[in-house]
Image: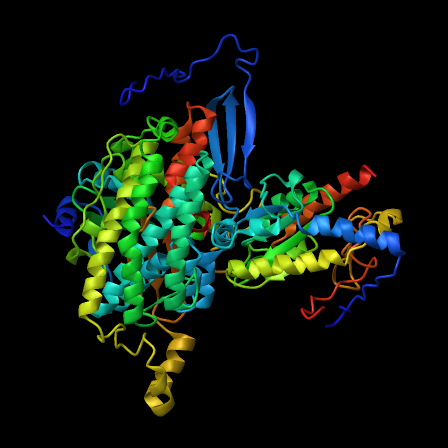
Amino acid sequence: MSGLGRLEGAFGGVEHVEVAAADGMPCVEVERDDLIALMTLLRDELGFEACTIVTAVDHFPREPRFQVVHQLLSLRHNDRVRVHCRVSEDDARVPSVTGLWPGAAYFEREAYDMFGLRFDGHADLKRLLMPEGYGHHPLRKDFPHQGIEPDRLYKEWDRARRHAAGSQG
Amino acid sequence: MSDSGMQTRLYELERGAVDRDDPLQGELMQLNMGPQHPATHGVLRLKVTLDGETVVAVEPVVGYLHRGKEKTCESLGWRKFFVHTDRLDYVQPVLNNIAYALALEKLAGLELPERAQTIRVLLMELSRIMAHLIYLGTTAIDLGAVTMFFWTFNEREKIYTLLDAWSGHRMNNTYVRVGGVYADLEERHETDMRAFVEQFPARIDEFERMLTRNRIWYDRNRGVAPISGADAIAWGLTGPNLRASGVDFDLRKRQPCSGYEHYDFEVPLGSDGDCYDRYLVRIEEMRQSVRICRQALDRLARSRGAEFLAEDRRYVLPPRADVGRSMEELIFQFKIVTDMALPAGEAYQGVESSKGELGFYVVSDGTSTPVRCHIRAPGLLSIQAIPVLAEGRLFSDMVAIIGSLDFVMGEVDR
Amino acid sequence: MGSLKPVEASATDGGFFATRADALVNWGRKNSLWPMPLGLSCCGIELMAMLGPKFDLARFGAEAARFTPRQCDLLIVAGTLTWKMAEACRTIYDQMPDPKWVIAMGVCSSSGGMYDSYAVVQGVDMLMPVDVYVPGCPPRPDAVIDAIIKLQRKIERERPVKSLLAEPVRDDVWDEGHGGFLRQPNMGVSTHRSGEYVAADEGEEA
């Protein structure tokens, strides 16, 4: 049974399934509250054993601003599916799928780092790529490409280093 | 464990066992490995908590090479981002180009001529060989087999010479464009390539004679950090790391792109998923890559003179001579170079790279400014699996594990 | 060249014996530059190729590529330096004993390269003084060997013995007038008259 057929058959109350025009991948649009239920269904009943992507797209200035994208892969059926979930900026929280796929942990940390999205249920949600203490979320559309004070943390460290070195004479 | 009559007694530390005579017993030590370290294969930091020689916990810290590539794509535009894709997994530059181009071509709905696809397959397999040579050279030198570094880099130099002649640069070639490849492959290049491919299997045999039944290599890799297929899938591993655990999933077979379905090759599988199996899988993949290269060269010989670029003037530059002669071509040239727009929508293309599934998720709104270009890097998941593989093991296994996972920080951090 | 001006190396400056001692020390130093390969990204692969069999940096005395800065005198920053890595890079530079030299290999470490983004240091000379810049993305190993030869010629112009009597100055002093780091004497070893930049190697010196 083709991937799309299986998906359409299984989704009763969840939002409609459509096929993305460009790459032929079935896409499901879902509300945040139904996300875990849908993911559990996909993994346990429809055989999507692997989670290949968890990321987000910033549609600023359109609201709801963030579109969280999960992409799953079924090895046994050789299928993929994409799940979209829109959240707004004031309430940028999404349930974490690390309970279903532990391999999604780093993806979610990166989405938090880059967009400021919080993943409820993630064991260790902290920055992945930017240094700890970095104050911005770079992939947001209102963040400039060249950054805001990119050397701030280094300057603080350097000041402390010179002070320590200077005090030793 | 006896092997071919060699009498060796092996003493193994039981997992989690503690040496009661050790005066430091129970006292944990924090050791920082990296970000600058010869054996971390790039700027990776590992915060290791040790109980004597046993690794109690390890926490990878990445991001020391985060250059903001995804943001850069949004600023530069689709076409100019090609040079940035080379620098992702920089040991196999052209393969990254191809993965990105395939995602864009999906979005644009472009069909590629057959010769372009064949050249791309040839370049992908050559990149795979280059990347596996780096794996062999660096992992072996980390475990003490210094000669392997020189042998594998010698082979890489031969490939570099080929690529230098074709594309003008040894690495980071950016040889690929939307709709095909930058330039055609001439007959002399094919001859040189064939000469390389014919001599390469003998080199792989040499590598195997050096390592495969080498007592030290075997002891340092066999039984080290096995991972089951189910765990590997749950942790998101792909590529040789997954296939070493026995899971038969290769995107070249299951979701082939660029004409891979026309090539005859096998996909090597391991059984235990330990470092030794990962090594064997990669060695055999190099042999299969040679097989694919031979077939690709035969196809190229048959299709000389055919088109190597699609004809769609919304995305593909016209030939330079025509630009000087025709107004339409000049306008196409100008439009593509300054302002290439892709149709609105989203597309994902996953490609079997040497590290696993390298994917580009591109979102466009119909203008020439990209909305999102997300790079799915297999190396990030390999690093995520380091705690799973290393905890409970001895610290010296850490080097073997890092080497066998074979990640490149350029794509991990982007 | 703006604030750069050529340095006249005077053969008689300091007397005959000091000059010969200078030459001896410089000869020893330039022919045994032990690199500290700070391979950060793609240039790191070309750095490895340079240490490999075809280009073989060992011919120039740079055999001992140690990965601990305490045993090296030449820091080759090969690859893109990010602000997150900057602290580690500066620490490595500080840990190197004097005399030390820095080669910025590739455009990323020379000037930030193709990355004008929020995370990339726009040139390693924002953190430390650099002796030789090697353009290229990545530069061919031949180009880096050329840089090392240029560095050797630069070392030849140093005055280590003469400036044993000179006062050591810290090497991280930012000079607004020059708009960069003053290339300080290496703890009593003077590369040039203190406070002046050395112009790029003209290439045609006899």
The location of residue B128, given as percent across then percent down, is: 32, 51
Instruction: Choose top left, top right, bottom left or bottom right for residue B143.
Output: top left
Q: How was the colour assigned to the protein in this rendering?
A: rainbow
* Position of C170 relative to C178 (above/below): above
Instruction: Choose top left, top right, bottom left or bottom right for residue C34.
Output: top right
Q: Residue furthest top?
A: B21
Q: Residue at x 54, y 54 (%)?
A: C80
* Position of A142 relative to B108 (above/below): above
State the residue in front, C48 or A85.
Answer: C48
Instruction: Choose top left, top right, bottom left or bottom right for residue B166.
Output: bottom left
Q: Is residue C37 left or right of residue A23?
A: right
The location of residue C129, given as percent across then percent down, is: 70, 55
Answer yes or no: is residue C172 visible. Answer: no
Number of numbered discs present?
A: 0
Q: Is residue B106 left or right of residue C143?
A: left
Q: Residue at x 70, y 66 (%)?
A: C200
The location of residue C24, given as percent across then percent down, is: 77, 50
